[in-house]
Image (tube, grey):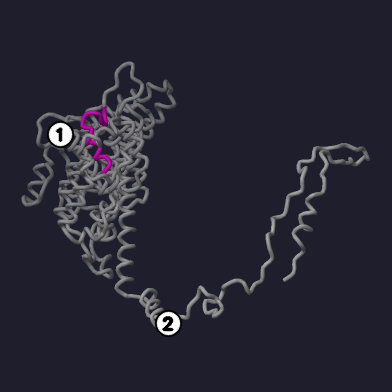
Amino acid sequence: MQRRAASTALDVGKTKSKMFLKKETRWGETYYIVNRWPETPKLPEEHEYFRINDLLLDLDDMLSKHVRPSSEEDEERALRKWSRDSKRDDVRWKLHRMETSLTWSRIKASEIHSEPSSSWRLGSHDLFSAALQAPTPAPLIDSSKKQQGPPNNATAEREPNKLHLVSSNNGIPKQALEDDSSLLRWFQSRAQPSWSGQYRAISPSHSAQLSAALRKQDSLTNLRRLVSQYLSVETSAISFHQLKSPGQEKSTEDLSSDLRNTCENLLKQDTLQNKHDVLVFLGNLSQRLTARGDHLGGPLCGLGLRLSAEICKPTASKRYFQIGLQTGYWTGSYQGSMDILHCLETYQCHLNSVSQPDGLDLCGRQELLELLLGRSRTHSHSAPSLINACLHGREQETAFEAYRASIILIGHLGMIEWLNQEQRASAAIIQRLARRSDSKDKKRQLEAILSEAFRSAMSIAGGSVVAQSHDAVLTDPSQAGDVCEEKDRNQYCPP
């Protein structure tokens, strides 16, 4: 292989360069610019030429003094070093899997402890729940028979195991779920920072932080865990309802609104099981707050009233209405009036349907009647009624629509005597509702609408003289408990 001499190559770079370079414009004018490369880059130096035969590429080159011929010992040594060993490969694979699992576990543990608003932090209730609920390695029922059972069973089969979810989000490997003692050690090691003072120092201490965390929840399981953990850590700083002071613009009642908005986002799937689950969650939360002297908050009471009406549970509707009365939610907010209207229209749709739900049997109608009229068979005094609350609503149009819906609903319950009395007293109600508008046309319009509503209710009540099966018509709220008792003494009537 021939190359030109190095001296010849270097002579090219020895040309003297100029400090300024001459340039011309489009119009022929001459100008100079600074030469940024005053010297031509030098080529690399080559000390000597070489021949390709001088490279020791062949290890069997007999002419080289540094290479000896290979022997059988070299072959055996190479086989021992480079041959595949199944045991060694198995150990390497197990080691790689352990390293991967350890890295994943550390990352999960770091994420769960660096996020104070995480709903998957371990607590004492998780240890107790894990002790009671063992993981299910196989489905409880065959996949071909999932659709034959009730909806709640099918939903339970589709939902992932809660223990697996808790373990996965806390970096606990699947192998630990197969051994109770190993699972206990993992739970204790992961829950230990939660019991220390360090966890309390970084835990959220304001309802505003809980409100921000609520917007990130995408499942009811996460929502339940988040609210439970906040209530467990901060028993005094979290309140779902607090009366506003005269100079206070914003109340902690907004926390109840934020929780309601989160629940409504979860309910957009519009499945009956979701409504049951959310209603159970609200009931448990209400009991927990009541036990510590706190209130559920008006917006959550309105959500409970809506859901209980949609799944046809008059007893639950009555309970949430009574809780909301304690804060004046129904008459003090537009949203409260809309919740009452939605409740009345929903029960009206249930009664209009051909196949009425199980919640509207004789005892269910008795509970609905007590909710509407405010009378109770267990107390001698009269309780506040849903009709009275809707009449005192802040929004006139909504209050009137709710009153009209209640009249139709009373007609479905067969209360002819009450309708006659209410129609005679409706003139004062129309006068009070029309007083806000100061319009005679508005008054005549209200009279016409109410007159039509009473006629429809009378027609419905007259056609429902024979109620479901052999149930008697409820003509007197005070005697409804006796009718329920005479129908079937073994039937359960809600207290």
Q: Residue furthest left?
A: 489
SS of the residue at dot 1? helix
The answer to whether residue 10 is left or right of residue 213 is: right
Q: Is residue 347 visible?
A: no
Q: Of the numbered discs in the image, which one, if any, rests on residue 74?
A: none
Please state which of residues 272 and 109 is positioned toward the viewer in this rendering. 109
Which of discs 2 and 1 lies nearer the camera? The answer is 2
Height in image: 489 above or below 402? below
Q: Which residues are magenta?
A: 225-241
Give the residue type at disc 1: Ala
Q: Of the numbered discs in the image, which one, if any, rests on residue 71?
A: 2
Give the residue type at disc 2: Ser
Question: Which quarter of the rendering shows the N terminus?
Answer: bottom right
Quadrant in the picture for residue 211: top left
Is 229 magenta? The answer is yes
Which residue does the image show at 37% across and 28% down from the upper left? Answer: 395
Which residue does the image show at 81% across and 39% down from the upper left? Answer: 19
Q: Residue furthest right?
A: 28
Coordinates of residue 380 in the picture (x, y in percent): 9, 31
Q: Residue furthest front?
A: 65
Residue placed under numbered mark 1 in the picture: 291
Coordinates of residue 173 in the picture (x, y in percent): 27, 57
Height in image: 338 above or below 82? above
Please state which of residues 456 and 400 is positioned toward the viewer in this rendering. 400
